[in-house]
Amino acid sequence: MVQIEDSKVASIGEVLNNRERPLKERFRALFTLRNIGGDKALESITRCFADDSALLKHELAYCLGQMQDVRAIPALTKVLADTEQEPMVRHEAAEALGAIGDISVEEILLQYSKDPVIEVAETCEIALERVRWLKQKATNEKTDSKDGNPYASVDPTPAADGRSVEELQRILMDETDTLFNRYRAMFALRNLQSKEATLALATGLKGKSALFRHEVAFVLGQLQEECSIPFLVENLRDPAENEMVRHECAEALGAIATDECTRVLNEYLKDEKRVVKESCEVALDMCEYENSPEFQYADGLVKLNDH
């Protein structure tokens, strides 16, 4: 791993924590810090939880989970326990604790699996299942693989074992099954990376749980399949839809990055929901990146070197 000077990491941390900077710049700084890792990056990310943007704080928690550094557990636990924090931020902190997967988080996840905020409670249930699954897997002495995941992401659940698209879709949409099992079907469909599997996934945007719908949108963003655009646009346009879902639909459209995606995102740049408006701003920056010759999205170091 390349060693980056502490002073450079600190400078990128200052961009992240500077409320005067455009949100898109702060996002790029955050993803740069995630890629660098280490003490200084963790400190800069956790310090930023004092910000007033729910979107940014949710993304901080997401990045800490993806870094899988146990030193982030106290900060994430504090965010999860803070009922003043927005539900989408607390949910992401719980998911991050599950992504880190250390058995020390079982108790806190169990405690908040009874949270009155449904998205938080459901996330804790899924995260708890993941921690227990990892513990069992370690007992069986199997190596921790990415279970066929073609993406670099740490997923909230392992993917289900090989089944047909029809069977996976049936599990995906079975409201009587556990969210853990339905998530497993979701990630198995994503890993197939086919148009048929993408369309099966898109039906999940009609699920009853907002948490579930938001995860479907996230996965569709990873797939970047144009056939999912009409489904994502429909949920983004729905003013009655949970803002956490609308935000994730906007970001998925940013990843797919066609002209139609850019047009729709521009329409919602002034949405009355701050998290939706900010998501569109960040998503348009993603569109720009996807359609440019830029080498990397997390370009905080490149920008530092340019100065």
Image (tube, grey):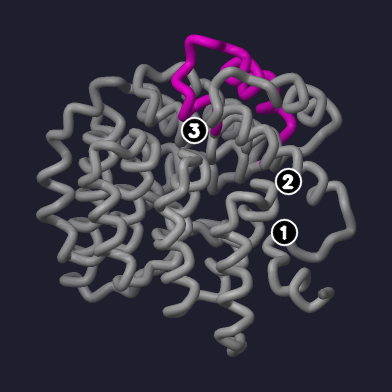
Quadrant (top left/top right/bottom left/bottom right) for the N terminus: bottom right
Instruction: Count residues near mark 3 (Cα–Cα under 10 Å), then give few for <14, some for 14-19, many for 20+.
Output: many
Q: What is the span of residues highlighted in magenta in the rendered image?
A: 224-247
Which residue is farthest front? 20
Residue 246 screen position, x and y as percent: 54, 25
Residue 48 screen position, x and y as percent: 46, 57
Q: Residue at x 74, y 32 (%)?
A: 226
Q: Is residue 102 visible?
A: yes
Question: Is residue 49 magenta-colored?
Answer: no
Residue 113 screen position, x and y as percent: 16, 39
Rendered image: mark on residue 297: 1
For the residues labelled 1 and 2, say whether their Cβ atoms are less than 8 Å apart: yes
Question: Is residue 228 magenta-colored?
Answer: yes
Who is closer to the viewer here, 219 or 269? 269
Residue 262 screen position, x and y as percent: 80, 30
Who is closer to the viewer here, 85 or 282? 85
Quadrant (top left/top right/bottom left/bottom right) for the C terminus: bottom right
- Residue that numbered label 3 is attached to: 216
Secondary structure, mark 1, is: loop
Residue type, mark 1 in image = Tyr
Is 198 positioned to the left or the right of 225 in the image? left
Q: Is residue 147 visible?
A: no
- Residue that numbered label 2 is attached to: 286
Who is closer to the viewer here, 307 or 197? 307
Q: Residue at x 75, y 44 (%)?
A: 285
Of callouts 3 and 1, the N-terminal one: 3
Residue type, mark 3 in image = Val
Instruction: Count residues near mark 1 (Cα–Cα under 10 Å), then give few for <14, some for 14-19, many for 20+.
Output: some
